[in-house]
């Protein structure tokens, strides 16, 4: 993720700066950072695949079904909040019908009447 890359760059610059000052802590810092990243990724994977998390996902899907929330409604909400469409990566392009806003965006400004002749 972008935040991890920025954090890693900041840490790397700090480590390089410390190494230039004659500090011998560079290998220790590198090992601690590597072990920390490994352990945190292991714990995140364990929690995400846990029975509790799977049950939580199942309950969320059941709640969405009760409320009548559709995939198209989720896309519309993401579009309205200027969020990336995470559902598009999992869906086939031919299988998903384009919403009215997507059709209007594809048609360009002429569809909005912005370029109408005067």
Image (tube, helix red, strand yellow):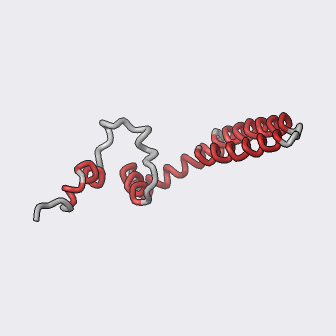
Left or right relative to 46: residue 33: right
Task: Give coordinates of residue 59: x percent, y percent.
Answer: 55, 51
Q: How many marks?
A: 0
**Front residue (pair 114, 34):** 114
Residue at the limit of the structure toward the bottom, as seen here = 118
Task: Give coordinates of residue 18: x percent, y percent.
Answer: 82, 43
Q: Residue drawn at (43%, 57%), measured in percent from left and top?
A: 82
Residue at the limit of the structure toward the left, as seen here = 118
Task: Give coordinates of residue 68: x percent, y percent.
Answer: 40, 56
Q: Quadrant of the N terminus?
A: top right
Left or right relative to 74: residue 36: right
Q: Quadrant of the C terminus?
A: bottom left
Figure quadrant of residue 40: top right
Residue 4 position (above or below residue 73) = above
Left or right relative to 51: residue 60: left
**Front residue (pair 23, 85):** 23
Left or right relative to 90: residue 57: right
**Front residue (pair 94, 109):** 109
Q: Residue drawn at (23%, 56%), measured in percent from left and top?
A: 109
Residue 111 position (above or below residue 96) = below
Figure quadrant of residue 94: top left
């Amino acid at each position: 993720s972008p935040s991890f890359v920025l954090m890693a760059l900041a840490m790397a610059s700090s480590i390089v700066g410390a190494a230039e000052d004659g500090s011998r802590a560079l290998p220790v810092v590198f090992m601690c950072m590597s072990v920390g990243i490994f352990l945190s990724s292991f714990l995140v994977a364990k929690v995400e695949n846990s029975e509790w998390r799977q049950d939580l996902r199942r309950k969320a899907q059941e709640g969405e079904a009760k409320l009548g929330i559709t995939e198209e409604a989720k896309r519309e909400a993401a579009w309205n909040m200027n969020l990336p469409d995470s559902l598009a990566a999992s869906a086939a392009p031919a299988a998903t019908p384009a919403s009215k806003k997507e059709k209007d965006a594809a048609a360009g400004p002429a569809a909005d009447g912005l370029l109408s002749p005067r």
